[in-house]
Image (cartoon, rainbow, N blue to C red):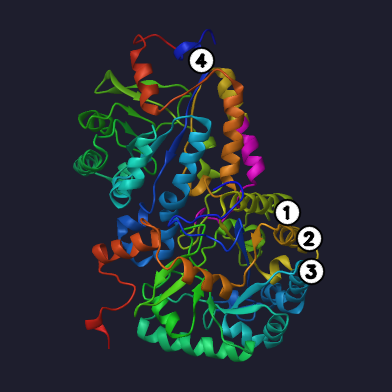
Amino acid sequence: MSGSVWPDGARSCVALAFDLDGPTGGAMLDGSLWRSPRHFSLGGYDVHRALPRVLDLLDRFAVPATFFVPARVVEMWPEACRRIADRGHEVAHHGDRHECYWDLTVDEQRAVLSRSQAVFRAVLGAPAVGFRTPSGDWHPETPRLLVEHGITYSSSMRDDERPYRHVVDGVVSELVEIPARVDLDDYAYFAYHRDPDFPKGQDRIAGYRSTLDNWRREFDGHHRAGACLTTIWHPKVSATPGRAIVLERLLEHMTAAGGVWFARCRDVAAWWRSRPAGVAA
Amino acid sequence: MTGAGTVRHEDGGPRWPGTARCAALVTVNFDGEDLLLAEPGMAGRQKTLSVLRYGATRGAARLLDALDGAGLPSTWFTPVSTADRHPGVVRDVARAGHAVGLRGRVYGPLDRITGAERRPLLAEAAHRLGVLAGGPVRGFRLPVGEWPLTLASELADAGIAWSSSWHGDDTPFVLPAGDGRHLVEFPAHHALDDRVAFYWNVNPPIPAGQSRIAPYAEVLDNWLLEFEGCRREGLLFVVQLHPEICGTPGRIGLVEELLATIAGDPAVWRPTGDELAAWWTATHPVNPPGHPADVFFASAEVNAGGRAFPRESEKP
């Protein structure tokens, strides 16, 4: 690697990101959620108890973050979601009810995007510019639909450790991708529930300290490589009272390293777009 | 909420009595063989069932000793079928000064029958368990399946004052139970359940993916970190133990270390379930705005017409 690709000569970039799914997802999509208060409460914990804990943690380290939030969560907890933006963070698109774009027709994808953008405008005062696919894959047409709906970046793919521009209709577009990695997805370590079961085989909850060790090593590697690290963290999963201590120790480690550009995803995308097109990183 | 002095709840009132920083509730799920007996093809599987029977033959006594050693109160939730199978354990638990809580008539879901069927079933189950325990049963924990929307009102009719079944918070909250009543809920989390960490069976495969038994030291460390987090933020710590899982010679040490940490900390309030329910009812009868339980019932009514208790006009 030669030279820094980040602002002010920073060695690496960390775009902390949280998916604030709340009680959206499969049970909301099939309607069973409204007969499932216990399951709902796992999702409600996200906004009621875990989100304030995350916001306090980010304040303590004075680092910004991006929250990908389904529009129904914004509607159910408008005050809490406004607080995210008020405290200097970004709120971005994550579906309406966390629907998997892979399962939707083009018209359905359009409907999800326009409904969600309308909710963002009404509740948060501005539409989202960022996008992260809920539950996995998108369609070949999705990037074009994103551009049509005012989205300027996505954080959905897994194929690099630095941003890149998506090719839309055969042309290198303005749509920036900030790829993430499952190694930094807390579902792979901590998520656990029953009825419905996750993980499917009901694997054990990982050791908190060994997970912290993994994540420190991930950060160290990204920092050394001058890469862009983003996280797939869920407040309800990673910000229990005990796991918030893990996040705290990781943030201590990251901020002590020096030379890290901590940024919201929208700022990372804008920076990447401002670089001369076609110049390899 | 750091430093000395009173810890405040979101509504501004004191969250715990006096200068207590946090509260801890030790709970035991005594399900015994009934954990599996309701499932098809399980009757007669003597080896598999004996794993669970161990709780009655050895684990419960060892767990009671550990609680006694730490001087901590606890509540033992048990299905009536288990209590009938092992009345001696229930008697020992009550004699040692611990509370007995209801876990249904049998270990099974409660959301497959109607409210009209559940109401008398739960009242009868609570009564029967009270006879075996030698006193009224006031606490409840849902075994499996979902919480039927009207369950709080049915439990209140059965004399139940509090439950520890939901997940949506790190402090107690209230559930509407109709007729101006409510149930106090002490949410519990899977991360603090020994069964999630350790239960394993070869045939049938449990857990489904037959994942390895978790490393003991890591599990204890996770529990202690959760406790540290609760203490820091002034929250409620609810641990779930099973006599057949952690009442073993090899694992009781983990329990003893956890209990000693809770018992040795003067900043921790260690109430019984009844004491905690009474405190919460008196101090926080209304949930803070945006609480998951309230958002659920409001949304369920709008989206599916679901309600926590029947409207006046719908009462029989």
User: Magenta stretch: residue A94 in it?
Assistant: no
**Residue A148 versus residue B53 in the image, above or below:** above
- Residue beneath label 3, please? B69
- Residue beneath label 4, please? A10
Chain ID of residue with mark 2: B
- The amino acid sitting under disc 1 is Tyr
Q: Secondary structure at mark 1?
A: helix
Q: Which residues are magenta?
A: A198-216
Structural distance between the alpha carbons of marks 2 and 4: 48 Å
Nearer the camera: disc 1 or disc 2:
2
Q: Earlier in the sequence, mark 1 or mark 2?
A: 1
Which of these two is toward me, A17 or A145?
A17
- Residue beneath label 2, please? B253
User: Magenta stretch: residue A215 in it?
Assistant: yes
Structural distance between the alpha carbons of marks 1 and 2: 10 Å
Structural distance between the alpha carbons of marks 3 and 1: 21 Å
Chain ID of residue with mark 3: B
Structural distance between the alpha carbons of marks 4 and 3: 56 Å
Disc 1 + disc 2, Cβ < 8 Å: no
Nearer the camera: disc 4 or disc 3:
3
Is B2 placed left or right of A276 in the picture?
A: right
Do discs 1 and 4 share a chain? no
Do discs 1 and 2 share a chain? yes
Chain ID of residue with mark 1: B
**Residue B124 versus residue B162 in the image, above or below:** below
Do discs 3 and 1 share a chain? yes
Name which quarter of the figure residue B176 lies in: bottom left
Residue B26: x, y in percent? 64, 67
